[in-house]
Image: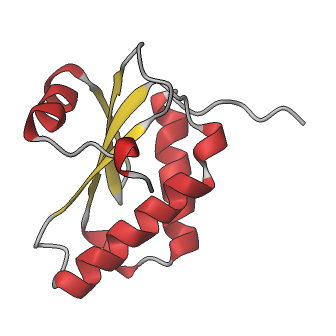
Amino acid sequence: MKKEYRVKKDKEFQAVFTRGASVANRQFVVYALKKEQQTHFRIGLSVSKKIGNAVVRNQVKRYVREACQLHEASLAPNYDFVIIARNPAAKMTAQEVADSLRHVFKRSGVWKRQVK
């Protein structure tokens, strides 16, 4: 995922937390903040040390980034997202992470319907 597609600075994270809407399931909490001037969505990740050691945390982050790239065409482009992983995410496969995130994105209303 390109650097310009990531939420990096603390001020940006805090803006999404304070002004954004949150939706959650058992594995993830997603905060979404609409930004009209953006042409692409941005992702910020937070994986606590409670999830596991560094290897496990990095694996969860890789799976989340992969899922976001997989669903790139289906996500609304003008949003900042902060995704917080919960404990069950540590034991999930990449496909399960993608399915769980799709579920949360659909609940939050940022999932664009696929036209067949």
Quadrant in which the N terminus appears = bottom left
Q: Residue at x 84, y 32 (%)?
A: 115
**What colour scheme has been applied to the protein in the rendered image?**
secondary structure
Spot the residue most to the top: 36
Quadrant in which the C terminus appears = top right
Q: Residue 13: horizontal and vertical position, in percent?
A: 17, 37
Spot the residue most to the front: 3
Spot the residue most to the right: 116
Q: Residue 45: horizontal and vertical position, in percent?
A: 27, 54
Q: Is residue 86 above or below residue 94?
A: above
Q: Residue 24: horizontal and vertical position, in percent?
A: 34, 44
Q: Is residue 54 above or below residue 24?
A: below
Q: Residue at x 25, y 86 (%)?
A: 55
Instruction: Say which quarter of the image contains residue 19.
Output: top left
Instruction: Say which quarter of the image contains residue 80.
Output: top left
Q: 93 or 24: nearer the eye?
A: 93
Q: Residue at x 27, y 82 (%)?
A: 56
Q: 38 or 58: nearer the eye?
A: 38
Q: Is residue 33 above or below residue 86?
A: above
Q: Residue 105: horizontal and vertical position, in percent?
A: 49, 40
The number of numbered badges drawn on the structure is 0
Q: 98 or 80: nearer the eye?
A: 80
Relative horizontal placement of residue 53, taking residue 103 as reference (left or right): left
Relative horizontal placement of residue 54, taking residue 35 as reference (left or right): left
Instruction: Say which quarter of the image contains residue 74.
Output: top right
Q: Is residue 19 above or below residue 73?
A: above
